[in-house]
């Protein structure tokens, strides 16, 4: 299979709709979570500006363990009671943090990261993990980013079924 990324155009919601269509095409017919997480990380990392890390942490029944990602080497294990990823997994709510230095218990895997958005991944009521994006720009993520990235995360979870 050959994949060609199509440049995103229009408003931010339009761009996320285009990115979601690309993601669904990339995930179509594949159920392996590692393969899908790897491809989705690469797609998002290269499609969206001002990101320095995009990837997945998977829940092993005890803590979050790093999965496929794009960016510098990452923290391998994150307890559910630590950091932005742990807060997303524990609360079941997307965490959108304008400045990670203001987030209590933030784990600095990459000192260059300033803002972060983490979407929890649930299949039914079961925690699968989190989809994590970091940016060197404070305030990088807004409500449109959150909505678009939550839709991408939902497409990932759907691909596992």
Image (cartoon, rainbow, N blue to C red):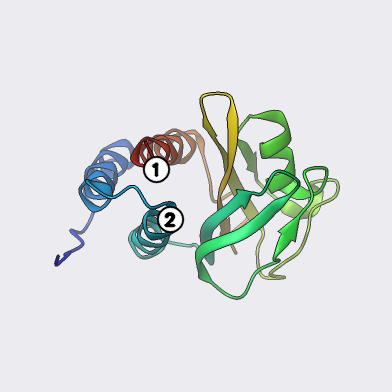
Q: Residue 42 or 129: which is nearer the viewer?
A: 129
Q: Residue 80 or 98: which is nearer the viewer?
A: 80
The residue where tag 1 is placed is 156
Q: Residue 153 or 117: which is nearer the viewer?
A: 153
Label 2: few (<14), some or many (≥20) within 10 Å? many
- Residue ranking furthest to the top: 125
Residue shown at 53% from the left, 71% from the top: 71
- Number of numbered discs present? 2
**Which quadrant of the figure contains the N terminus?**
bottom left
State the separation of the CA atoms marked 2 and 1.
7 Å
Name the disc covering residue 37, or none.
Answer: 2
Name the disc covering residue 94, or none.
Answer: none
Q: If you read the primary sequence from the N terminus, does the residue marked by circle 2 or circle 1 appear first? A: 2
Quick one: SS at disc 2? helix
Q: Residue 114 or 80: which is nearer the viewer?
A: 80
Image position, residue 80 (x, y; %): 77, 43
Discs 2, 1 touching: Cβ within 8 Å: yes
Quick one: SS at disc 1? helix
Image position, residue 123 (x, y; %): 50, 31
Residue shown at 85% from the left, 46% from the top: 104
**Which quadrant of the figure contains the C terminus?**
top left
Image position, residue 2 (x, y; %): 14, 67
Image position, residue 72 (x, y; %): 58, 75
Label 1: few (<14), some or many (≥20) within 10 Å? many
* Lateral position of residue 16 relative to residue 135, left or right: left
Residue shown at 23% from the left, 44% from the top: 18
* Lateral position of residue 11 relative to residue 111, left or right: left
């Amino acid at each position: 299979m050959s994949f060609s990324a199509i440049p995103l155009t229009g408003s931010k919601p339009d761009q996320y709709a285009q990115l979601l269509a690309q993601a669904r095409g990339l995930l179509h017919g594949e159920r392996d979570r590692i393969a899908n997480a790897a491809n989705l990380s690469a797609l998002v990392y290269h499609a969206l500006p001002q990101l320095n890390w995009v990837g997945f942490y998977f829940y092993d029944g005890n803590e979050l363990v790093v999965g496929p990602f794009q960016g510098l080497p990452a923290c391998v294990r994150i307890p559910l009671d630590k950091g932005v990823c742990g807060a997303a997994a524990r609360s079941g709510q997307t965490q959108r943090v304008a400045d990670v230095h203001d987030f209590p218990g933030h784990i600095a895997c990459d000192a260059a990261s300033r803002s972060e958005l983490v979407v929890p991944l649930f299949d039914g009521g079961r925690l699968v993990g989190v989809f994590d994006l970091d940016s060197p720009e404070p305030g990088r993520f807004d409500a449109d980013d959150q909505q678009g990235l939550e839709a991408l995360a939902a497409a990932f979870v759907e691909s596992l079924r």
